[in-house]
Image: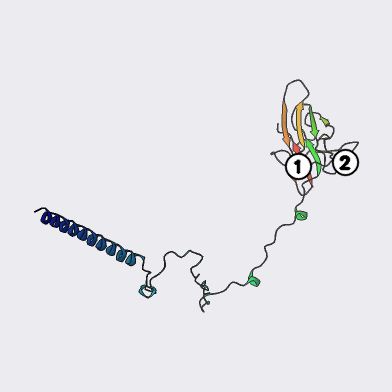
Amino acid sequence: MTGKQARQIRSRWQFGIGVTVAALICVLSGWVVLQRFTASPIDPSSIDPLTPNNDLKATDRPTPAPSTPTIPTPTATQRVPSLASKQPTETPSSGKVALRQGMFRVGNPTSYPVRVALLSQKTVATAQTGAARYELPAHWDFSPEEGGAEGLLVSLPDRTLKLKKGDILVAFAQDGSGRYWGPYVVDETALPTWNAKAVEWQLILPP
């Protein structure tokens, strides 16, 4: 009995070892086959050559040729403006603009003794940087109604008197009444008035 039991135990042990080895061989075989399939290279012929590559950079893509703009041809009803038909516009020359400078006429048709004072601007030729803009004041005295409505030409002993734009005039009574006229700015206020025919400025004091 002892020998028979020993043989049975040995045969069971050998069967278990055989089954275990067979299982290990199957597992190893399957793992090798799986590695071969996953490591196999991709066949280039299986790639569709017509599939666009979206990974291309913008600089790798071909640039389309710029289209040439078409210039419309003028039809018979269209007229092309000619430069020769345009006439130059004449602009008035500064030399043609007459400067309203002239003599000075004063009339006192009032019943007041009047003094007329003049503050004359210096001309561009005589003006200096930082110097005064006006000449020394000048004045003339008129008796009541002297010169009347026609006026009298006045002058200066030390220089030629030419009244011009911007000169300042003022008149005031000398009888203590406090009456005065002005101030007037030549060529900017209503008085004095310009007489183009006589080429003079006229200050006729209003009564």
Q: For this rendering, which residue is in front, 57 or 25?
A: 25
Taking the view exactly as shown, the residue that stands out farthest to the bottom is 76
Residue 60 in the image: state x and y as whole percent.
50, 67
Taking the view exactly as shown, the residue that stands out farthest to the left is 1
Q: Is residue 191 visible?
A: yes
Quarter placement of the N terminus: bottom left
Q: Quadrant of residue 160?
A: top right
Residue 66 in the image: state x and y as whole percent.
52, 71
In the rendered image, which residue does mark 2 sit on?
160
Q: Residue at x 62, y 72 (%)?
A: 82
Vertically, is 175 above or below 85?
above
Determine the secondary structure under disc 2: loop
Badge number at residue 90? none
Determine the secondary structure under disc 1: loop
Residue 107 in the image: state x and y as whole percent.
77, 35
Whichever of callouts 2 and 1 sits on the residue coming sooner in the sequence is 2
Type of amino acid at the residue the image marks with label 2: Thr
Q: Residue at x 75, y 52 (%)?
A: 97
Q: For this rendering, which residue is in front, 40 or 122?
A: 40
Q: How many marks?
A: 2
Residue 158 in the image: state x and y as whole percent.
91, 36
Q: Quadrant of residue 182?
A: top right
In the rendered image, which residue does mark 1 sit on?
165
Q: Residue at x 72, y 30 (%)?
A: 181
Distance in Å between CA atoms under marks 2 and 1: 16 Å
Camera-near label (2 vs 1) is 1
Type of amino acid at the residue the image marks with label 1: Lys
**In screen coordinates, is 107 left or right of 34?**
right
Q: Quadrant of residue 149?
A: top right
